[in-house]
Image (cartoon, grey):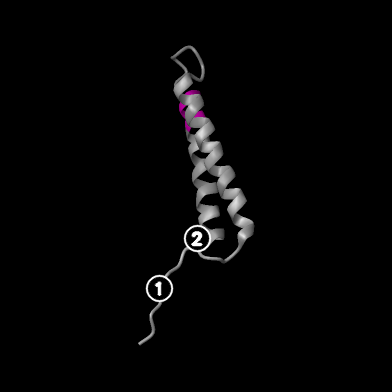
Amino acid sequence: MMSNRFTLSKRLLGLLLLIGGAAAFMGILAIDLLDVGREGGIGPAQQIALVGAAALALVGVTLIPLGDRRA
């Protein structure tokens, strides 16, 4: 009996992190743009979330070139 065990490659993990980080970054900015009634712009909590989302995407970009090795 053959076993088809799925293994997560570094390339796939990198793509998932990149997509997730970019989506989070755009989502945070979209929330700020849609909430036009509030004044003050991007607050400290949003800045931290934006930096975290950008860092997540950056880690994803660095994993993509590592190819099909196991994550």
Residue stretch rendered in magenta on the structure:
28-33
Amino acid identity at mark 1: Arg
In the image, 66 versus 17, the foreground residue is 66
Q: Is residue 10 above or below residue 2?
A: above
Q: Is residue 17 left or right of residue 6?
A: right
Helix, strand or loop under label 2: loop
At a point 53% along the width and 32% down the height, the residue shown is: 51
Residue 31 placement (x, y as % from top left)? 45, 28
Residue 16 placement (x, y as % from top left)? 50, 52
User: Is 16 covered by the magenta stretch?
Assistant: no
Circles 2 and 1, Cβ within 8 Å, touching? The answer is no
Q: Is residue 42 above or below residue 21?
A: above
Viewport quadrant of the N terminus: bottom left
Residue at the extreme front of the image, as rendered: 70
Residue 65 placement (x, y as % from top left)? 64, 58
Q: Real-space Cα distance between discs 2 and 1?
A: 14 Å
Q: Is residue 14 above or below residue 21?
A: below
At a point 56% along the width and 37% down the height, the residue shown is: 54
Q: Main secondary structure of the magenta part?
A: helix
Amino acid identity at mark 2: Ala
Residue 5: give its label.
Answer: 1
In the image, 33 versus 6, the foreground residue is 6
At a point 56% along the width and 49% down the height, the residue shown is: 60
Mark 1 nearby-residue class (10 Å; few <14, some 14–19, many ≥20): few
Helix, strand or loop under label 1: loop
Instruction: Give the residue pinned by disc 2.
Output: 71
Q: Is residue 8 above or below residue 4?
A: above
Residue 33: give its label.
Answer: none
User: Is 30 covered by the magenta stretch?
Assistant: yes
